[in-house]
Amino acid sequence: MVGDRVPLRLVRSGSSLACQLGRIDRGKIGAMDGPDTVRDTDGFQPDSLAGPLEILSRHSGGAAPARMFVLSAPSGTGKDSVLAGLRRRNIDLHIAVACTTRQPRPNEVDGVDYHFVGREEFAEIRGSGEFLEDAVYAGHGYGTRLGPVREALNASRDVLLKIEVQGAATVRLKVPGAVLIFLAPASLDDLRERLECAAVERGVADQADIERRLVEARRELACLPGYDYLVVNHMHRLEETVRQIEAIILSERTRIGAVPIRV
Ligand code: 5GP
């Protein structure tokens, strides 16, 4: 048997290739009997009454077949617009609300955008091991609480964490089955333009702040090889970006042999 993978049998039915869960008689598979098409079942016998998701769950030790996604992006790349796009497309996801020690911005709502906490409270949560991951970014603490993530996974809901690169590295170590998506601008010039436009819209022209974010973006882009997927958010092509991320999520939901998510 290979890891936690589920057995697969490939059967031609009419002109289409049908996949059935069950034991494989390797001798009869012939040309399809290759390492990419067939997984050894190691004696696993699915209950004929069980549905495919139940079979998957049982085979992975009863772990919920929910997935965990991490979305990281340099500041200004358009991560929040992409998430709003996913919501518009009714992608069912639990988007974790993080704790932060930074002050709320105008229009941000406590408990919706973030849980805004003091430094002492943040340190307490951290000390009691209640964070799945946490990091310091621009001098402020950011952390994802374990409880709500666990609850969502137990209810078989996929979870998405929108976190920066240090937090993503922690998740990679603690949750090997998590799927890491990096959302990048087409170029640093493109990102500069986005940051300048956003500054004009907000009515604050802080060139030093823009330069600081660009330096940070360079550092974050260097972490790209540690991710599973790269999605480029081209200017004025938001819907295309949203569709690409949706495609990743939908594909990962149907992956057989994914590492079970346990937190
Ligand atoms: P902002 O303060 O601009 O909302 O977020 C700054 C950065 O912190 C963004 O890259 C954002 O994705 C990241 N971030 C938000 N919440 C968390 C969290 O819980 N953990 C980590 N590691 N990063 C977070």
Image: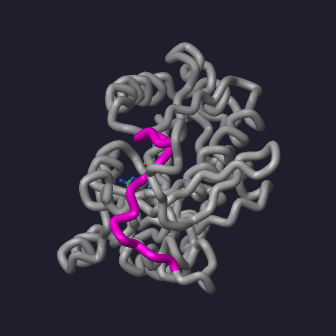
- Which of these two is toward me, 231 or 184? 231
Q: Nearer the viewer, residue 14 or 204?
A: 14
Vertical order, 146 against 140 (above or below)? below
**Vertical order, 69 against 247 (above or below):** below
Front residue (pair 226, 55): 55
At a point 31% along the width and 67% down the height, the residue shown is 132
Q: Position of residue 28 (x, y in %)?
A: 52, 50
Q: Main secondary structure of the magenta part?
A: loop
Q: Residue at x 45, y 30 (%)?
A: 209
- In the displayed structure image, the side of residue 166 where residue 180 appears, left or right: right
Quadrant assignment for the C terminus: bottom left
Whether residue 35 is in magenta: the answer is yes
Q: Is residue 101 visible to us here? A: no
The residue segment tinted magenta is: 33-46
Picture quarter containing residue 201?
A: top right
Q: Quadrant of residue 133?
A: bottom left
Position of 116 with respect to 235 (left or right) is left
User: Hey, which quadrant is residue 211 in on the image?
Assistant: top left
